[in-house]
Amino acid sequence: MPTQEKTAPLSKTSGITRMKGCSVLRHWKVGVLLLLLTAVAVWPQVPAHAQGTSPVRVGLYYNASALSQVTVSSTGGLKLGWLTSGETWPVELLTQTGQATWLVRPETGGRYRVASGDLPDRATAADLQRCFERAVLAWTGSSWQIWVGDAADAANATALQNELASQHPEQTWRVVGPDGKRSELCTSSGQVLAVLPASDFYLAAAEGPFINFDNKPYRGWLELRQQGGRFRVINYVDLEDYLLGVVPREMSPSQPLEALKVQAIASRTVALTYRKHGSQGFDLCSQTCCQVYDHSRETANSNRAVQETRGLVITHQGQIKPVYYHADAGGHTENPVYVWGSSIPHMQSVPEPYPTNSPYEYWEERLTAAEIKQILAQMGHHVGDVLAVEPLAYTPAGRVERLRIVGTMGSTILEREAIRLNLRLKSRVYTVKADIPAVSVLAANGQVLAVNPSGLQVATAAGQQTLHRTDAYHLLGRNGQRRPSPAQAASFLFVGSGYGHGVGISQHGAYAMARQGHTYDEIIKYYYRDVEIVKLGD
Ligand SMILES: [Zn+2]
């Protein structure tokens, strides 16, 4: 590395040191930054993506989960990208080769700097940058510049501007004031590689598929946008690459290949049709709301399922339509009219063709009366102390359609998915039993029995009646004393089967069908009605 001798500072207040030999723009062959950064011409660039399709945009951090700073790394280097209008994939602006870690943060300090004019490319900007001790690359959104100095106020910056104008008259220099909306791209030690404007920019691995972010590997580009000091992070990923991250998160990769192919085709169809987050600037989130996604669990088996079904999607009447799946049907899949209130022509209600032997075939959940009271209160239903939980109607497939909850101050009825989601039950295939304290009864043979008082025939002043679980009653002791009995259940036991809303493909049902030798198209056409499996573009 050539020695760069320093002259006296141009400006004490700005702290600028002009490098010897830089009175005019020169092309240094090496420099500290040039060792880190390989020259990349800015325009035009061939997008890294070769398939010509639009990216799937997956929201990773946004709104309340936006991050105060972002750290990414890759063993194969990192690249900074920019998206020009009319393009679908970012182009490369700046690259660091080899093992690299970058930190992105809001621009630090409330300082003034002096900006050069627009430079023809990044390499020219890097050459000019090496003329100064304190200078950073700055991307304006359309050109590279260098920004020199670090002045505390505009007056000092103006003094520096005048000095720069005399030293580098070939450039047009202007003062740049602080702007909290800009971001800085830094090395892991905090050295600023580039200042970026208040717009979206993109980060990706330079070589190899994975950029590591938040302790997980991601394929494609990460789009960052700073808003109010926090970064929204969206993953721009090719559809087929996206599926490599979804299939092993939505299904166990050790399951039969045909079941994994079912998931790949269903998830590809979902990716092209779900648009729940369009108003938030992306297509799908990475959670169960859309499809669980990241690349930490990729396996050869799940990748093979994606690759061997490449481009295959599910159509109904010649159109790609949203499809639905869930973990376990609990014996019978559900007509969506009993789930979301409206029918979907290509979703049907069918029995599981084989035993699933799934961990969700039988489950029990106990909710205390106090917990149910609290859940209802959060929903705005104030029924007092909960006395009874009663399914009023079941769907033809066996799910609770209406659930009445009776309390000391009134009752309320929950319907369809509101039941499952609010009570946080695995499914709506269940029976419910009140845990009412047992009553000790002296039988005719002298034995003392513990019995559930609900449903007992009892003698009352009005004659023989059936005791209901919400009735208050008194026990008459042998000594003739009356004792009020606790009619209120302390808790309610839900005994059920299945996991999820029950619409469309049952994943555990698909495992069972695949184990029985069924192919992916047989499985898909069993659970969905009047569908075809076609290749995109055909
Ligand atoms: Zn979502």
Image (tube, helix red, strand yellow):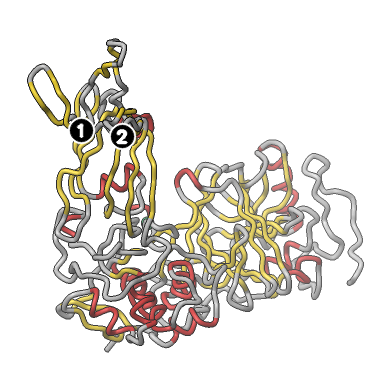
Front-most of 161 and 75?
75
Relative to 469, residue 509 above or below: below
Left or right? Give the position of 409 relative to 151: left
The quarter holding residue 194 reads: bottom right
Q: In the picture shown, does residue 440 fall above or below 511?
A: above
Residue ID at (45%, 46%)? 63
- Quadrant that contains the N terminus: bottom right
Q: Counting residues from the N terminus, which is met first, the one under dot 2 or under dot 1?
A: 2
Give the secondary structure at mark 2.
strand
The answer to whether the residues at label 2 and label 1 have Cβ atoms under 8 Å apart is yes
Residue lying furthest front: 445
Residue bearing the label numbered 1:
456
Which residue corresponds to the image point at 48% horizontal and 57% vertical from the top-left?
A: 60
* Quarter assignment of residue 330: bottom left
**Residue 388 visible in image:** yes
Give the residue pinned by disc 2.
451
How packed mark 2 is, by other alpha carbons closer than 10 Å (few <14, some 14-19, many 20 or more), is: few
Q: Residue 467: x percent and y percent?
A: 18, 29
| Quarter of image, res 86 | bottom left
Q: Position of residue 113 (x, y in %)?
A: 67, 47
Label 2 and label 1: CA atoms lie apart by: 9 Å
449 or 32, which is in the foreground?
449
Crowding at dot 1, Cα within 10 Å, few <14 / some 14-19 / many 20+, comes out as: few
What's the amino acid at mark 1?
A: Leu
Q: For the C terminus, which image quadrant? A: bottom left
Query: As shown in the figure, which amino acid type bears the numbered disc 2?
Result: Val
Residue occupying the point 35% across, 32% down: 447
